[in-house]
Image: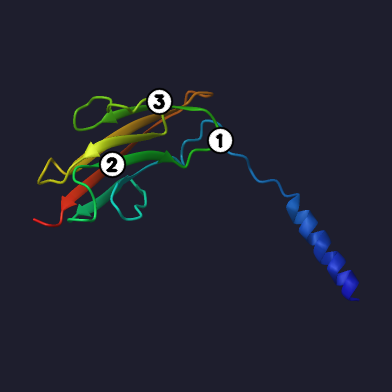
Amino acid sequence: MEVSKMLIAAGFAAALSLVAVAPARAGDLSGAQLTCYVDTFAFDVPQAQWCHSTWTPGTATNPSVAMFEVTGLAAGNYSFAWTDLETGQTPSGCGNAQYCIVPIATETRGDGEARARVVVTDTATGAQRSLDATAWYWDGYN
């Protein structure tokens, strides 16, 4: 009796493994997000669309950098066009890559803000999506 139950369970598991998972569709950029974090001595975790950090002595450097990264893309080939929304220019060193690193300083040593936009293009289909994110860096000492 126990053997027949095991065979039924094994057969059910085998049938479930045959269920096809829908593949990601080319040109579907709906899951794409622009994440960011401000680099500190903590274990910084990227957040979608906005991020922040607070500087105090011994917790980070000031100035530091803000790291922007496109996440949530389906398998495929993409091109990336970055824009610094404060200057309207392509940030130095941010070419056709999935990430962009820009300098940032607290509001007492700069403006405390870095804003980025990236236009992601699926090179197979030509589909595009524009994504924005803002990083803030505050002075927690003064």
Between the residue at mark 2 and the residue at mark 1, the CA separation in whole angstroms equals 26 Å
Asked whether, in this view, residue 124 is left or right of residue 139, the answer is right
Where residue 137 is drawn, which disc sits there? Answer: none
Asked whether, in this view, residue 56 is left or right of residue 39, the answer is left
Image quadrant where residue 69 sits: top left
Where residue 75 is drawn, which disc sits there? Answer: 1
Amino acid of disc 3: Asn
Name the residue located 49 percent from the left edge and 38 percent from the top edge.
Answer: 73
Q: Earlier in the sequence, mark 1 or mark 3?
A: 1
Image coords of residue 129 (percent x, y): 40, 32
Asked whether, in this view, residue 109 is left or right of residue 96, the answer is left
Helix, strand or loop for disc 2: strand
Amino acid of disc 2: Ala
Image coords of residue 37 (percent x, y): 31, 47
Between the residue at mark 1 and the residue at mark 3, the CA separation in whole angstroms equals 17 Å
Image quadrant where residue 118 sits: top left
Between the residue at mark 2 and the residue at mark 3, the CA separation in whole angstroms equals 18 Å
Helix, strand or loop for disc 3: loop
Name the residue located 84 percent from the left edge and 69 percent from the top edge.
Answer: 6
Up the image or down, 109 lies above or below 53; here it is: above
Furthest-bottom residue in this view: 1
Amino acid of disc 1: Ala
Crowding near the residue tagged with mark 3, few <14, some 14–19, many ≥20 C-alpha atoms within 10 Å? some
Residue situated in front as seen by the camera: 89 or 29 = 89
Image quadrant where residue 142 sits: bottom left
Instruction: Check disc 2 and report the residue beneath it.
Output: 66
Image coords of residue 130 (percent x, y): 36, 32
Q: Are discs 2 and 3 less than 8 Å apart at CB?
A: no
Where residue 96 is drawn, which disc sits there? Answer: 3
Residue situated in front as seen by the camera: 61 or 22 = 61
Q: Earlier in the sequence, mark 2 or mark 3?
A: 2
